[in-house]
């Protein structure tokens, strides 16, 4: 591989610093955002140049108006200062070193990232790449979804190789992305969709990226905090969308529900069993031919009535769609006539054998095809379809000699899912601009998170081994800037899961961004595995709904800061070496620690509790952290812990999907310091939040000897449907019974039991066994203070 050997000169062109390496080429450094630097290679040889191709992910038109780099020529190197970062440019060989700026804006200490000693940029024929020096502090997170078939997937990818080429066959999915986050305190995003490979330190000295073709454009993203890296990265490629609130409920799915009568009976069974339900997913049987994008009226004679009736019960309908049109489908003739399909090299439509029948592939690299596909969604939106399931969009079968409007198959393959999702998003923008996006997608690319995409791990097996892979996949996706993720609860393919496996998968799924069972020609309803399993599953689904105020606030954090729902322990405890490789437990937000059981027959499992104190969610027992414990885990129990210092808001499970939370319980787990939680809420349905129509409420608890002070601030902001008056309850973990409890200075009456407390509008009761103080507070339209002494 050739490199840029030396710096012949440099100059500023607007806000870009051009580093001229003579006939070999140029490196262009541009401040993109505060703390984000674009590095672009312009190759020197005319026969190896490609015309600049606009990015489908990064839009420079949205970059802020940052000042140009400040350059100091210091003889053998340049020092380049931009807002939020600094770069040293060694002149011979040409090497880059990146810093997050020090307190005075300088570049103190060791750089966060440096080119390899012989130089960073690599090129050979059409190949391009970049290599960096590997340091002992480099540990790599993110990278999307590696191959589940090649043994345990690590949380830390150091020392591994990963191909960047979306693939599903043989199942399940592989979706490695050109984005990583290093524990050293920086991120990298390489903006090139061609087939490529990460080599993350197999030689022990360097790590890097190499693509088969395309342009070398990468972004250095400064931290040093990992949360800062995710914040800046998602600002660059697009903030994760805010999903509608119903999407955080329980979505029932399987392959599949065949008739309108079956779907109506399914919803009725959930009501009868008092199991909350927010959505039903319709697999292939809702249409006659793949590519119809219309209901089969023989099986679903009145889809509008069905959807309306389900909506009245709080249940939305999500339908599957694929990018393949079989030749017998309703849309194929029109797509062929308009030239909207992938083409053969001779210019004709490329039709090939497919498991659904002879089929062609919609060419989403063609703007007309995207608009045409978006328009085909309007009749379904008019019926009331609430969400979409974009399947097979790696694409699953993609002939290598297929020609697209946007280039050869290899050039567009990894982008294909993004372009398909963008077409569905276009349908919303044009036909339902106030309707929030929710699109389940099997493949994706940086940018899909901004288009309402929730990715899932594909057709996973119905095995314990498959379940064991899922937690770390969710963590990898979240650290790639894609917080919305889920797996087929129970597994998709293979022998039917045992009741134990289904229960354990449900427990894990309770703490994934989307909770959705799925299986191939197998029942996945909560009652399909016997009464004992049904009782446990009901309990966890209800828990999911109870915690919706907390989870929905996490969705707001994802939208505003790029933070994932599922967080590796290392994200919040980066200095704890034990957190570096833990792949089978995680944080749900900042305050809940989840330790799924992923092996059969377990009655307990080891759990690592980071520094500080933690509370057992089920028993309330306070436990010292910074150590491993053996957590009880009988079948009905998911090991679950709450950080000391947390405030967990909770709503009644049967009313948590209502337009506003009129009744909230504040579960308080005192720590040594002040506790805070900022609750987010909006109408849950529309895009009004983007216009500022939302509210936040700050809860603060200040511990004191024998009790503490809970302050509920008045709501800030407003939205349609916001409750004018609220009823709050408090559940405060205290080691002993308090002497007195007052609200805004007014003494509350102690009650004789929990049952007695429920018969009065206000009062308090202390549970000596569980060591919890329960308080019913008076209705309030603003804020209040609760003092416990």
Image (cartoon, helix red, strand yellow):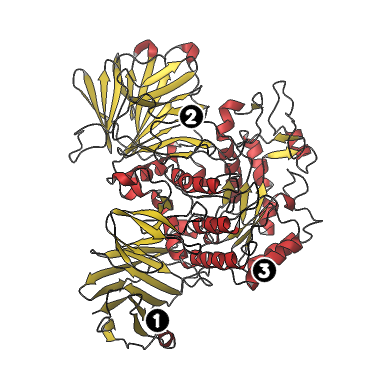
Residue under numbered circle 2:
192
Q: Earlier in the sequence, mark 3 or mark 2?
A: 2
Residue under numbered circle 1:
779
Task: Answer left or right for 502 relative to 586.
Answer: right
**Quadrant housing the N terminus:** top left
Task: Answer left or right for 158 relative to 275.
Answer: left
Q: Measuring from the top left, give residue 611's x and y in whole percent.
A: 27, 54
Q: Measuring from the top left, give residue 442's x and y in whole percent.
A: 58, 43
Quadrant hosting residue 349:
top right
Quadrant hosting residue 444:
top right
Q: Measuring from the top left, give residue 691's x and y in whole percent.
A: 46, 57
Task: Decide: few, some or many residues near mark 3? Use Cα within 10 Å; few <14, some 14-19, many ≥20.
Answer: some
The reply to whether dot 1 and dot 3 touch (C-beta < 8 Å) is no
Task: Answer left or right for 703 relative to 749.
Answer: left
The label number, if any, that marks residue 97 in the structure image: none
Determine the CA span between mark 3 and mark 2.
Answer: 49 Å
Tell which of 25 and 263 is nearer to you: 263
Residue 684 versus residue 122 in the image, above or below: below
Determine the CA span between mark 1 and mark 3.
Answer: 36 Å
Element type where label 2 sits in the image:
loop
Residue 274 versus residue 550 in the image, above or below: below
Task: Answer left or right for 321 relative to 673.
Answer: right
Element type where label 3 sits in the image:
helix
Task: Decide: few, some or many residues near mark 2? Use Cα within 10 Å; few <14, some 14-19, many ≥20.
Answer: many
Residue under numbered circle 3:
269
Q: Measuring from the top left, give residue 707's x and y in whole percent.
A: 25, 75
Residue at x 68% of width, y 64% of height:
266
Q: Earlier in the sequence, mark 1 or mark 3?
A: 3
Dot in front, 1 or 3: 3
The reply to whether dot 3 and dot 2 touch (C-beta < 8 Å) is no
Outermost residue toward the right in this view: 298
């Amino acid at each position: 591989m050739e490199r840029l050997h030396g710096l012949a000169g440099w100059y500023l062109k607007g806000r870009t610093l051009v580093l001229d390496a003579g006939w070999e080429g140029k490196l262009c450094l541009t401040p993109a955002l505060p703390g984000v630097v674009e590095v672009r290679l312009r190759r020197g040889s005319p026969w190896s140049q490609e015309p600049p191709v606009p990015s489908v992910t990064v839009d420079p038109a949205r970059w802020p108006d940052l000042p140009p780099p400040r350059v100091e020529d210091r003889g053998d190197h340049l020092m380049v200062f931009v807002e939020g970062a600094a770069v040293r440019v060694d002149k011979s060989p040409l090497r880059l070193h990146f810093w997050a700026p020090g307190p005075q804006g300088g570049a103190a200490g060791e750089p966060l990232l440096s080119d390899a000693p012989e130089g960073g940029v690599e090129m050979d024929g059409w190949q391009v790449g970049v290599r960096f020096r590997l340091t002992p502090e480099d540990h790599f997170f993110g990278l999307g979804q590696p191959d589940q078939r090649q043994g345990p997937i690590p949380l830390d990818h150091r020392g591994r190789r990963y191909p960047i080429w979306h693939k599903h066959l043989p199942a399940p999915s592989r979706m490695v992305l050109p984005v990583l986050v290093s524990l050293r305190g920086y991120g990298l995003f390489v903006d090139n969709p061609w087939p490529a490979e990460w080599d993350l330190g197999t030689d022990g000295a360097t790590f890097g990226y190499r693509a088969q073709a395309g342009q070398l454009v990468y972004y250095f993203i400064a931290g040093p905090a990992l949360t800062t890296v995710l914040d800046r990265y998602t600002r660059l490629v697009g903030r994760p969308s805010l999903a509608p609130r119903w999407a955080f409920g329980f979505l029932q799915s399987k392959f599949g529900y065949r008739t309108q009568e079956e779907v109506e009976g399914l919803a009725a069974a959930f009501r009868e069993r008092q199991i909350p339900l927010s959505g039903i997913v319709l697999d292939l049987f809702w249409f006659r031919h793949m590519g119809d994008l219309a209901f089969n009226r023989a099986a679903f004679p009145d889809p509008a009535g069905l959807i309306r009736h389900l909506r009245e019960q709080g249940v939305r309908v999500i339908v599957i769609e694929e990018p393949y049109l079989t030749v017998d489908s309703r849309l194929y003739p029109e797509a062929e006539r308009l030239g909207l399909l992938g083409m053969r090299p001779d210019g004709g439509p490329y039709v090939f054998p497919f498991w659904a029948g002879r089929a062609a592939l919609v060419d989403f690299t063609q703007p007309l095809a995207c608009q045409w596909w978006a328009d085909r969604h309007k009749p379904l939106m008019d019926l009331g379809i609430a969400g979409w399931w974009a399947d097979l969009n790696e694409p699953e079968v993609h002939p290598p000699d297929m020609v697209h409007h946007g280039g050869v198959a290899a050039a567009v393959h990894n982008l294909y899912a993004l372009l398909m999702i963008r077409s569905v998003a276009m349908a919303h923008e044009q036909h339902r601009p106030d309707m929030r996006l929710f699109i389940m997608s099997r493949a994706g690319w940086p940018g899909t998170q901004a288009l309402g995409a929730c990715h899932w791990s594909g057709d996973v097996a119905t095995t314990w081994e498959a379940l064991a892979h899922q937690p770390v996949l969710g963590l990898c996706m979240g650290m790639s800037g894609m917080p919305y993720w889920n797996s087929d609860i129970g597994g998709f393919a293979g022998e039917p899961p045992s009741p134990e496996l289904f229960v354990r998968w449900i427990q894990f799924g309770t703490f994934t961004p989307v909770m959705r069972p799925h299986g191939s020609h197998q029942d996945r309803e909560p009652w399909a595995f016997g009464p004992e399993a049904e009782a446990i599953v009901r309990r966890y689904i209800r828990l999911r709904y109870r915690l919706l105020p907390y989870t929905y606030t996490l969705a707001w954090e994802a939208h505003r800061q790029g933070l994932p729902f599922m967080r590796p322990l290392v994200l919040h405890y980066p200095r704890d070496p034990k957190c570096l490789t833990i792949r089978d437990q995680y944080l749900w937000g900042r305050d809940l620690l989840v330790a799924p059981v992923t092996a059969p027959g377990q009655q307990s499992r080891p759990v690592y509790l980071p520094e500080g104190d933690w509370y057992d969610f089920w028993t309330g027992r306070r436990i010292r952290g910074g150590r491993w414990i053996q957590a009880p885990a009988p079948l009905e129990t998911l090991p679950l812990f709450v950080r000391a210092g947390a405030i967990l808001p909770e709503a009644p499970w049967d009313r948590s999907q209502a337009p506003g939370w009129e009744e909230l319980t504040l579960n308080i787990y005192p720590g040594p310091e002040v506790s805070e939680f900022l609750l987010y809420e909006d109408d849950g349905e529309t895009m009004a939040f983007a216009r500022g129509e939302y509210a936040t409420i700050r809860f603060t608890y200040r511990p004191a000897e024998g009790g503490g002070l809970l302050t509920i601030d008045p709501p800030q902001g407003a939205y349609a449907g916001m409750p004018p008056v609220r009823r709050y309850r408090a559940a405060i973990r205290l080691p002993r019974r308090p002497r007195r409890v007052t609200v805004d200075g007014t003494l509350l009456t102690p009650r004789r039991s929990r049952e007695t407390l429920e018969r009065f509008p206000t009062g308090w009761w202390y549970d000596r066994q569980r060591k919890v103080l329960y308080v019913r507070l008076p209705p309030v339209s603003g804020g209040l203070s609760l003092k416990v002494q």
